[in-house]
């Protein structure tokens, strides 16, 4: 083998640390970005965050009233929608707007009837401690509450409860009987919320029905139905009528009473904020325009600390001065990377809103087919960048909170030469089934034909696939005989 020395020219891609940082920030969620910013603030004295003051409540109320009056006026005077609805992008407003976007009347929260921060188990223990239980019964009650799942059901067998209590009483010569546990359980099931600690849905509903006044219409009939719970669950109404002796009208009224009960009494204590996603982008309609802006609540203002930057001297080559120089360079690069992330996110979100205006106007049925490449070509970015910027980023609209990826969907050709998105087709299927006659539910084949009449040519198996993705049972399972 002969060795030689020579020069070779080749093209290669080299990612600078700043570019690597910008790419990494782009794919972070708002919470992850907040954590990353805090790490940078803690480690770099040249970087600082500006604290913002909120608008006064008085000025906020004035803004709300003005916007509500304007919206009412628009809705009354809007005879038709224009063919093109402009989309405005506010970038400068992001840095001047003080109040939260979610304080606007379009996104006001509804009245919250949850139990604050009180957990289900804490709520139950407060009630148990007020009851005149013996020490052993109180211990049984504690073990029952400890075995409740998030739905409020008893997630343990009676034998397991006995074993748990017996283990705690191992120092005492006392045997816990099954009847004792059942008696305590029945008392707990009648605490608030009614039905808590039930072992299955049938028992949960039975406890709630029995707690109703005896004068409640169709109470006794509902109890009778629950004794035939298996038939009720399979919707075998003919056998129910035969075995209960109730006629169809009374049977329907008893079922309607059961529908007013709570199948999962513990769910009202579920911490619904735990999975709440903070919107990165907000879109709202104002003066006939859809306005897109970043959520100022997840965009902290960063700047170079003027005190430490003023200590840097040009000609000074000392270690301290060089340290401040490096920290200022890192702070500037980080601020620039965050700024680029925000600009890219806004640009992509604006493009998505422009394509999906029909969704904002009429809902899921108006969703247009859209793929990553469409947005990438329009905003002149790579598809991988679009994928990063739409992952774990959420858009708050008057129709709800959606991940940006929700607005991308495959397309199906229509009979008139256009295209329909799979999301819009699912919405149409859902609407058709919602409007069907429950005694004669629509089969997948009939739904396919109805969609074809609407210009959407899909096969029966495609309808079945979309229906199953919506967790809608087949027509035979949806059929109601009364």
Image (cartoon, rainbow, N blue to C red):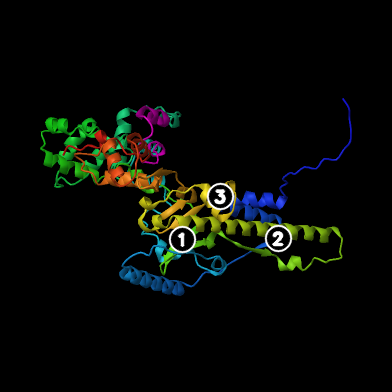
Please report the bounds of the magenta region as a residue range.
143-165
Taking the magenta stretch, the answer to whether it contains residue 144 is: yes
Residue 399 in view, yes or no? no
**Front residue (pair 428, 83):** 83
Give yes or no for residue 212 being in the magenta stretch.
Answer: no
3 and 2 marks in contact (CB < 8 Å): no
- Residue 72 visible in the picture: yes
Residue matched to label 1? 283
Secondary structure type for disc 1 = strand
Q: How crowded is mark 2: few (under 14 residues within 10 Å), some or many (20 or more)?
A: some
Which residue is at 30% across, 39% downward? 448
What residue does disc 3 label?
A: 386
Looking at the image, residue 49 sits to the left or right of residue 176; the answer is right
Real-space Cα distance between discs 3 and 2? Answer: 25 Å
Mark closest to the chain's N terminus, 1 or 3: 1
Task: Please state the horizontal and vertical placement of residue 463, each as a whole percent of the image.
Answer: 34, 38
The N terminus appears in which quarter of the rendering?
top right
Q: Label 3 crowding class (10 Å Cα cut-off): few <14, some 14-19, many 20+?
A: many
SS at badge 2: helix
Q: Mark 2 points at which residue?
A: 332
Of pointers 2 and 1, the one earlier in the residue sequence? 1
**Residue 210 image offset from top left, x and y in percent:** 21, 41
Of the two numbered discs 3 and 2 on the same chain, state the one appearing first in sequence. Answer: 2
Res 165 quadrant in image: top left
């Amino acid at each position: 083998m002969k060795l030689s020395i020579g020069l070779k020219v080749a093209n290669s891609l080299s990612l600078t640390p700043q570019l690597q940082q910008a790419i990494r920030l782009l794919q972070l969620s708002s919470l992850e970005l907040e954590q990353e910013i805090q790490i940078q603030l803690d480690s770099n004295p040249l970087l600082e965050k500006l604290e913002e003051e909120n608008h006064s409540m008085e000025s906020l109320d004035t803004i709300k009233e003005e916007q509500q009056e304007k919206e009412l006026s628009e809705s009354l005077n809007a005879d038709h929608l224009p063919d093109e609805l402009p989309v405005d992008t506010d970038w400068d407003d992001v840095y001047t707007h003080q109040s939260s976007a979610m304080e606007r009347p379009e996104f006001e929260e509804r009245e919250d009837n949850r139990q604050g921060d009180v957990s289900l188990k804490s709520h139950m223990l407060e009630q148990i401690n007020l009851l005149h239980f013996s020490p052993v019964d109180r211990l049984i009650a504690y073990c029952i509450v400890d075995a409740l799942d998030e739905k409020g059901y008893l997630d343990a067998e009676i034998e397991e409860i006995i074993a748990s209590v017996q283990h705690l009483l191992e120092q005492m010569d006392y045997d816990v009987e099954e009847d004792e546990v059942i008696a305590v359980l029945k008392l707990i099931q009648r605490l608030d919320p009614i039905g808590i600690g039930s072992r299955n849905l049938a028992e949960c509903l039975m406890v709630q029905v029995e707690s109703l006044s005896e004068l409640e219409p169709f109470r006794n009939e509902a109890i009778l139905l629950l004794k035939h719970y298996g038939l009720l669950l399979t919707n075998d109404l003919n056998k129910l009528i035969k075995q209960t002796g109730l006629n169809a009208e009374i049977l329907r009224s008893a079922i309607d009473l059961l529908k007013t009960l709570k199948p999962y009494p513990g769910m009202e204590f579920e911490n619904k904020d735990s999975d709440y996603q903070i919107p990165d982008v907000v879109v709202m309609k104002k003066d006939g325009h859809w306005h897109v802006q970043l959520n100022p609540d997840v965009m902290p203002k960063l700047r170079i600390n003027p005190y430490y930057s003023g200590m840097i001297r040009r000609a000074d080559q000392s270690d301290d001065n060089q340290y401040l120089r490096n920290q200022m360079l890192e702070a500037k690069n980080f601020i620039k990377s965050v700024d680029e992330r925000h600009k890219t996110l806004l640009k992509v979100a604006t493009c998505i809103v422009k394509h999906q205006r029909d969704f904002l106007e009429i809902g899921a049925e108006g969703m247009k087919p859209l793929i990553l490449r469409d947005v990438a070509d329009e905003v002149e970015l790579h598809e991988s960048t679009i994928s990063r910027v739409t992952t774990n980023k959420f858009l708050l609209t008057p129709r709800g909170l959606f991940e940006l990826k929700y607005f991308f969907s495959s397309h199906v050709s229509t009979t008139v030469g256009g295209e329909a998105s799979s999301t819009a087709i699912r919405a149409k299927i859902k609407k058709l089934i919602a409007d069907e006659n429950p005694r004669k539910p629509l089969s997948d084949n009939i739904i396919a034909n109805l969609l074809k009449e609407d210009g959407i040519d899909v096969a029966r198996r495609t309808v079945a696939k979309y229906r199953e993705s919506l967790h809608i049972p087949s027509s035979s399972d949806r059929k109601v005989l009364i």
